[in-house]
Image: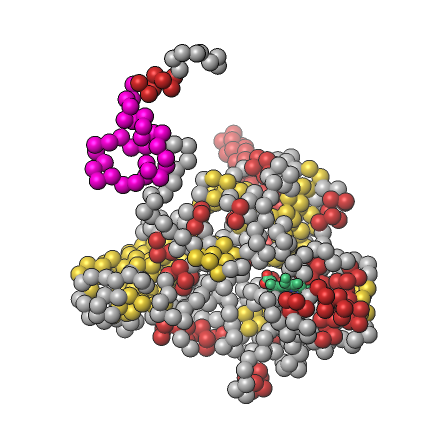
Amino acid sequence: MTRLLTIAAALLVATALIAAQSSPKRYGIGTPATPDQIAALDIDVRPDGMGLPPGSGSAREGAPIYAQKCAPCHGANGEGGAGDALVGAAPRDGAPFGPEYERWRNGRPDVPFTIGNYWPYATTIFDYVRRAMPASAPGTLTADETYALTAWLLAKNEIISESEAMNAETLPRVRMPARARFVPDNRKGGSEVR
Amino acid sequence: MRKTPGLTRRDVLTTTLGAAAFTLATRSAAAQETPLADTTKKWGRLPNALGARSPVETPKRTLNLPTSSRTPLQDLHGTITPADLHYERHHSGLAVVDPRTYRLLLHGMVDRPLTFTLDDIKRFPATTRVCFLECAGNFFGTREETTPQDVCGLTSQTEWTGVMLSTIFNEAGAQPRATWFLAEGQDAAVMTRSVPIKEVLRDAMLVYAQNGEALRPEQGYPVRLLLPGIEGNASVKWLRRLELSDQPFMTREETSKYTDPLADGTARQFSLVMDARSIITSPAYPQTIEKGFVEIRGIAWSGRGLIRRVDVSTDGGKTWKTAALQQPVLPKAHTRFRYAWQWDGRPAEIVSRAVDETGYGQPDMTALRQARGRRTRYHLNPVTGWTIAGDGRVRFGVERVRV
């Protein structure tokens, strides 16, 4: 009986020790972040629209901003230059790869991957342009300018109309032509080449 | 200490060591490093504060501006990449960050949003790990005059030190519903990637040291994310912010770029793990070899774990032999392989092929193109080889990777 108790007690102690070792431990290091500190850095925009700021802009409003701040590197019509090609709706309802594309292309030169034929989410344009463009002065665009440029890029790619305003409500609702093509990683090691 | 006029410690030393040593010690650095015909007849330079390579050894990164520089794989032995030869891939140049004002913000789906200073991060229990880091766009090979550095110099290996990401997440009280996190850098690209938590948390670290010393500026000083086995772009440098979320953010680098358009018309996203790969680093272009004994040397690695085996062929892939692996073989790490060969002087092609612990065998370019199609650009890890002409000249085997 006593022996059993001793064993039981020993087991309890052992379990407690294991628990203490593996249980999450906090070190009390770091300083609580204030809402202001978070707001100052939290510039990301998610496909569901989280993070989009107030403001608005249409392709019409975007055109002169694009001509001034973007065209030198991306071409007057987004055809590309020092920076990537940004405009290219073809192949309509297709993508620049895969069997349908090869039939559509029919031996003609390849088209570039663009916002119009490859980007799965419209919110990515806002997020990326606001953080990284223009490459000569990143992080200098206002929210209105960024909405207007996003609208210009979407209209040039024949996804929205010239007059449609992009804002926190409308942008997340834009359906991108290539959206359905994106699939999760299906490689998992093993003998099959994927 | 009080300065005594008259006999200083320096005078005493000088007198003791003699005039010759003193002269040597005070000569210019260049002169001191010049090889002497007989090094036994003259004192060399005395210990100094910062070492340098032998002036005869001049390994260099090659540049592909404005985006990258590549590690000279053919100049390295063993498995560690010297910090100043680690490859670079920056999207908007490198950020020079003041460690005194550096802050890392951790927020989103956590119970306690926190900021950490560099000292804070260094106070946490530390871990050291050796692993490779490889850029997702690490294949080039259209010319015979191509060195290992050109073929796949966007991979390097480092002994990293830092804190486990899980420790930091725990400190802030990561919520169980959080399945992704955003990592953001403070370069001019304000680089951002979404990372799936479950897939990486066992290995992920925040690192502040590289081969024993502080990170190099070009490796994200003072703190970068380190995701062993995963495409380099996700190991965000100059890390300023981590945000936990229940969904990915779909940043430009995980949609427009770093995705794999496939043969069937779908595009693979978040193809993060770097599949197994190998390259013979010697003999390689531009070497010329001599008849007789040649040790074939190279590195193999897999983002999925251990390298199980490296096969080497000296007849262009008709027959294969098993190479010797340098121990210890570490998971998700460059592994040195060697194969003893007798070259008979006849034209040959030497090829290597890695197999990892999942049984995955490094594929031929044809198999990759069959599976992925013509326009896929990232995550290419084809079997490569070197042709050897009768005169011993070694060239990159372009035919093997042409499609």
User: Who's the residue at 33% across and 59% down the image?
Assistant: B281
User: Where is A145 relative to B125, above or below?
Assistant: below
User: Where is A14 relative to B69, above or below?
Assistant: above
User: Who's the residue at 37% across and 35% down the image?
Assistant: B28
The reply, left or right, for residue B228 in relation to residue B397 is: right
Q: Is residue B205 magenta?
A: no
- The C terminus of chain B, quarter of image: bottom left
User: Where is B131 relative to B399, above or below?
Assistant: above
Q: Quadrant of residue B61?
A: bottom left
User: Who's the residue at 32% across and 26% down the image?
Assistant: B22
Badge count: 0
Report x, y in % for residue A142: 77, 58
Magenta segment boundaries in residue numbering: B16-45
The reply, left or right, for residue B265 in relation to residue A53 is: left
Q: Is residue B33 magenta?
A: yes
The reply, left or right, for residue B115 in relation to residue B143 is: right
Colouring convention used in this rendered image of the protein: secondary structure
Report x, y in % for residue A168: 79, 63
Work out whether residue B306 can be spotted.
no
Report x, y in % for residue A52: 76, 59
User: Who's the residue at 45% across and 40% down the image?
Assistant: B212
Work out whether residue A148 can be spotted.
yes
Report x, y in % for residue B354: 37, 63
Q: Quadrant of residue B38?
A: top left
The reply, left or right, for residue B63 in relation to residue B36 is: right
Q: Quadrant of residue B294?
A: bottom left
